[in-house]
């Protein structure tokens, strides 16, 4: 039984549902918690624009009033931007959010001209050609630095679009209290990856990555992976219990 869906998008990013529609769906199907977590500001196609940000805040407040039985988190799926663990957040942004998701996405504006050649381009090319061990280490270190710099709650679709050392990443996630997501749209982890994550003591969180209200809590793909990989549901942070996230939970 999944009690919360913490990765949902709205029309402010590229979803097809409004915040109220997503929350209404969550309340109707009996979820205890939901998080609105649109793409971060640096995505060239999907990111939330700062000029719409105040509208999002108002809609979150309205949804909380309309659905008092539902705990509604306001979050952001932030983009990893460089080898230093930079994200598309400013320090004063953090006060607005209840949770931060960390992920890698292509077609994101680089931190600087130099970072485009040091991070964005090498990672993009690694998706075409085999990732070198040096690049994999740099990718992993970038994620770990970001988790250390920011109150990251969980990692979205780990190993998708960017190659990392799962063992080192899981070890850091465990130490920092960061969950690894099993994503409703895609699971890029292998069964061997799952074994490594569990051996390091890290936990998963199951989410829909919903881009429309109809897909809120749609997690058939991760549930299939859980069964095939032999993952115990006690290692799923939002299965029959509510997770405690880093940040303002």
Image (spheres, rainbow, N blue to C red):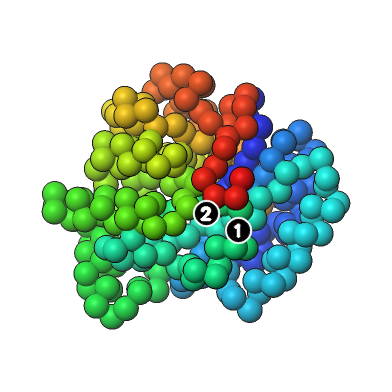
The residue identified by callout 2 is: 100
User: Who is closer to the viewer here, 247 or 240?
Assistant: 247
Q: Using residue 154 as the reference point, say whether residue 148 is left or right of it.
A: left
Q: How crowded is mark 1: few (under 14 residues within 10 Å), some or many (20 or more)?
A: some
Residue 246: percent from left, percent from top = 52, 45
Q: What residue do we see at 66% from left, 63% from top? A: 11
Q: Residue 227 carries which label?
A: none
Residue 138 shows in this picture: yes
Which quarter of the figure is the N terminus placed in? top right
Residue 119: percent from left, percent from top = 26, 66
Dividing the picture into quadrants, the one containing residue 174 is top left
Residue at mark 2 to residue at mark 1: CA–CA distance: 7 Å
Q: What residue do we see at 22% from left, 69% from top? A: 118
The residue identified by callout 1 is: 97
Q: How crowded is mark 2: few (under 14 residues within 10 Å), some or many (20 or more)?
A: many
| Mark 1 element type | loop
Q: Do the residues labelled 2 and 1 touch (CB within 8 Å)?
A: yes
Q: What residue do we see at 62% from left, 24% from top? A: 240
Dividing the picture into quadrants, the one containing residue 87 is bottom left
Residue 180: percent from left, percent from top = 43, 39
Residue 131 shows in this picture: no
Which quarter of the figure is the C terminus placed in? top right
Q: Using residue 179 as the reference point, say whether residue 146 is left or right of it.
A: left
Residue 94: percent from left, percent from top = 55, 63
Q: What residue do we see at 46% from left, 33% from top? A: 204
Vertical order, 60 against 54 (above or below): above
Counting the numbered discs, the total is: 2
Vertical order, 246 against 116 (above or below): above
Vertical order, 232 against 175 (above or below): above
């Amino acid at each position: 039984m999944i009690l919360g869906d913490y990765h949902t998008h709205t029309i402010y990013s590229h979803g097809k549902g409004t915040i109220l529609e997503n929350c209404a769906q969550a309340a109707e199907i009996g979820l205890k918690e939901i998080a609105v977590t649109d793409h971060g500001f640096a995505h060239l196609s999907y990111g939330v624009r700062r000029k719409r940000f105040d509208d999002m805040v108002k809609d979150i407040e309205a949804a909380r009033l309309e659905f008092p039985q539902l705990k509604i988190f306001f979050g952001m799926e932030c983009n990893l931007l460089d080898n230093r663990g930079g994200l598309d957040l400013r320090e004063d942004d953090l006060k607005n959010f209840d949770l931060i998701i960390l992920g890698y996405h292509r077609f994101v504006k680089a931190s600087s001209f130099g970072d485009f050649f040091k991070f964005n381009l090498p990672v993009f090319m690694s998706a075409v050609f085999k990732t070198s061990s040096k690049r994999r280490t740099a990718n992993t270190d970038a994620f770990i630095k970001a988790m250390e710099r920011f109150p990251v709650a969980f990692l979205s679709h780990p190993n998708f679009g960017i190659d990392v050392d799962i063992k080192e990443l899981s070890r850091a996630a465990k130490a920092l209290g960061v969950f690894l997501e099993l994503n409703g749209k895609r699971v890029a982890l292998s069964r061997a990856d799952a074994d490594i994550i569990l051996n390091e003591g890290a936990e998963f969180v199951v989410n829909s990555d919903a881009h429309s209200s109809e897909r809120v809590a749609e997690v058939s793909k991760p549930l299939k992976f859980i069964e095939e990989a032999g993952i115990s549901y006690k290692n799923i942070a939002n299965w029959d219990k509510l997770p405690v996230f880093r940040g303002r939970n």
